[in-house]
Amino acid sequence: MNDLRSILTEQVDRLIGDAGGIALLRQIEAGEWPAELWAGLEAQGLALALVPEAAGGVGLSWGDAAAIWQVLGRHGAPAPIAETMLAGALLASAGIEVPEGPLGLACGSAAVPYGRHVARIVLLEGNTVALHEPGEIRPAGNVGREPRDAVMPGPRIARALLPNEFGPRAGLLGRALIRSAVIAGALERVLALTVDWANTRKQFGRPIGKFQAVQQQLAAMAGEVAAVSVAVGQAARAADAHGLSGAAFEIGCAKVVAGEAATLGAATAHQVFAAIGITEEHELHHFTRRLWSWREEGGTERFWAAEIGRAALSRGGANLWPDLTARDPQGSN
Amino acid sequence: MRFDLPDTPPDSEALRAELRAFLSEAGRNWSPGTRARSWMGFNRGFSRQVGERGWIGMTWPKKYGGHERSSLERIVVLEEMLAVGAPVGAHWIGDRQSGPLILRLGTEEQRLRILPGIARGELAFCIGLSEPDAGSDLAALRTKAERDSNGWVLNGRKIWTTFAHKSDYMIALVRTSPAPEGGSRHAGLSQFLVDLTLPGITIRPIRDLAGEDSFNEVTFDDVKLRPDDLLGQEGAGWAQATSELGFERSGPDRYLSSFPALSTGIDALNAAPQPGAEVTIGRMVARLATLRGMSLSVGGMLERGESPQVEAALVKDAGNLFEQALPEHLRNLLDPGDASPELREMLGVLAQLAPTFSLRGGTREILRGIIARDLGLR
């Protein structure tokens, strides 16, 4: 990780950590808007992080963004900052001035994260992007009890074409990358919580983490956590090299691996925590419920695997390996 | 634990093209069973051809027969060999493990004597670790070398030694002094470079469940070793033998062992399409791409001189899960009547071979124990 990236991620980590932890997640699940955290995120310039410097933004790469989203996930992603960053990038690339405030991404039938709280709606249809005032809102939530609202677009403020590098599925690809990255972070958190618990909880006269049966499960989980992180890193790097549209394969891979890892990670954590882990009082479920929800958002494992599999089948067995290596970054060193 | 994003070597596409042309010619007559055996296929003629191309000992200095190329270029070669299931067994251990160990710890005489032969694809190596009462608990080994006036006398027994019956040398880990009372059992172990043609060595192949001779029992009965058959430092054998594990456990041979069945399976599915197959295939490809990234990441760390032992254990565990699951996924997609004869042959071989994937080079349980220790659980 480069220096700039580690400074950024540390800043974000501190900022969200200071803003309230589990108490904040509970407030969000109760329908409150994380006003203080949002103000801090905006003050750090994160809302415009993916907007090019020429357009008044910070001009971060997808790799930087994914690293920030991973940190966000470690804290349960308690604000729609990732969606706002993505929406800002799309607006700016189409030459539309990025408005202040949280932005809601609306594409297809997908619910809008924090829709009831957003200042503007960014509507994606194919390769057009449009900025709208929010219209009628039907509040809803996911299993993580995060706001996932149906938002009708209100009056249109601007509309433009996206550049080719975003392709006709920029919203889906961006959301898949966001969800993969926040899953990676949330899984890191769940693993740390679970290891800590295994070292604390005593049964049969010793910490349960001293039992090989528990150690073996947590080691397998650590493998999955590492896998998601690598898959997300590869996806973001591909997006930097080829644009979101050109990174569909890597982003799809990341979402497949993230979804599978979320399933195993949440199951393992609950197995090790046992009864205490399923109580309302405990912090674990704020992360595991989000993991279960995030699997479904930005395309499921099944959705992306089908796309990857169809391509592999149509290319034939002899091309499978050459196609994979042909995607390696070239001339980077 | 840390996985930096992998680098790729410059001009690797040119090297890959060269390898693919060579392998398509060399592999014209390989049976599906040979491809499914992959690096468990032992073919000295093929290894000599690979050596002639300069693809063994690639990173070693030229004066030892090497080619002074980067370790990532070497990974390109390994990947391409494994992707087509080339029978690389005769040079695999020498290139991956024994050669690098000799290069790092051997005397100049040992390097000059041994390394050029490995690089030419002529000298085959086996690894003398397991014993009848020392498997995962390797430090329980009892084979011993005792000093005499001319050097060392070796007595004991190694078992499950892959390809010992076809190899020229074994690097054996043996006890050269008793473990100190109440001290670490890792002390007092040393490594020897054992010429398998020496008198007193009996190699008995152990037929495996597939009906093949792949592993062996090797008995040492007063085998006379010269002083310069000692490899590295007397008493430092444990550290020496475990120092190469990052290389041994993170390479593409830890996740690609059954890969040829995936390409063959894709063709079989195109000939006999099955509903929903694309989801299973896509899940496998996504895993494959991710494991490759993880393996290359560790490769990059090794190239920079780091020692990513835990990361390597993790790659091996995750890779073994993948290469074991792959043939089972294909079975779930295609009934035998729908599978091509090629795929049926591969799946037959892999069903019998796959249990070894998570045994060889450190069992799943040992690897997960290493990971658990790093997590702070042990």
Image (spheres, coloured by chain):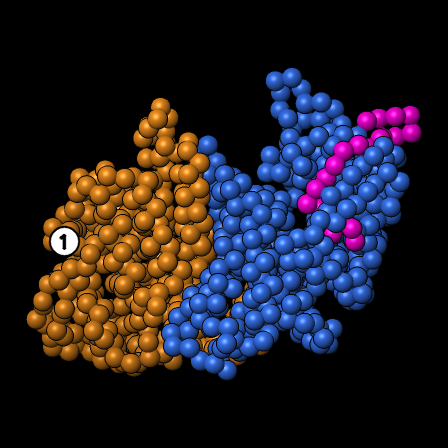
In percent of width and height, residue B255 lies at: 55, 58
Determine whether A282 is above or below A184 in the image. above
Q: Is residue B297 visible?
A: no
Identity of the residue drawn at 60% across and 54% down: B251
Residue at 59% from the left image edge and 44% from the top image edge: B362
CA neighbours of label 1 inside 10 A, class few (<14), some (14 to 19), many (20+) = some
SS assignment at label 1: loop
| Position in image of residue A156 (x %, y %) | 15, 78
Up-down relation of residue A136 to residue B66 (above or below) = below
In the image, B282: left or right of B209?
A: left
Chain B tint in image: blue
Q: Is residue A74 above or below residue A203?
A: below
Q: Is residue B101 magenta?
A: no
Q: Residue furthest right?
A: B150
Residue B25 in view: yes
Amino acid under disc 1: Trp
Q: Is residue A125 left or right of residue A328?
A: left
Q: Is residue B222 left or right of residue B69?
A: right
Q: Is residue B147 magenta-colored?
A: yes
The magenta stretch is B146-166
Considering the image in quadrants, where does the C terminus of chain A appear? bottom right
Residues A299 and A74: in front is: A299
Quarter of the image for residue A84 reads bottom left
Which residue is depicted at the point 17% across and 62% down?
Answer: A148
**Residue B195 lies in quadrant:** top right
Q: Colour of chain A?
A: orange
Q: Which residue is mark 1?
A: A33
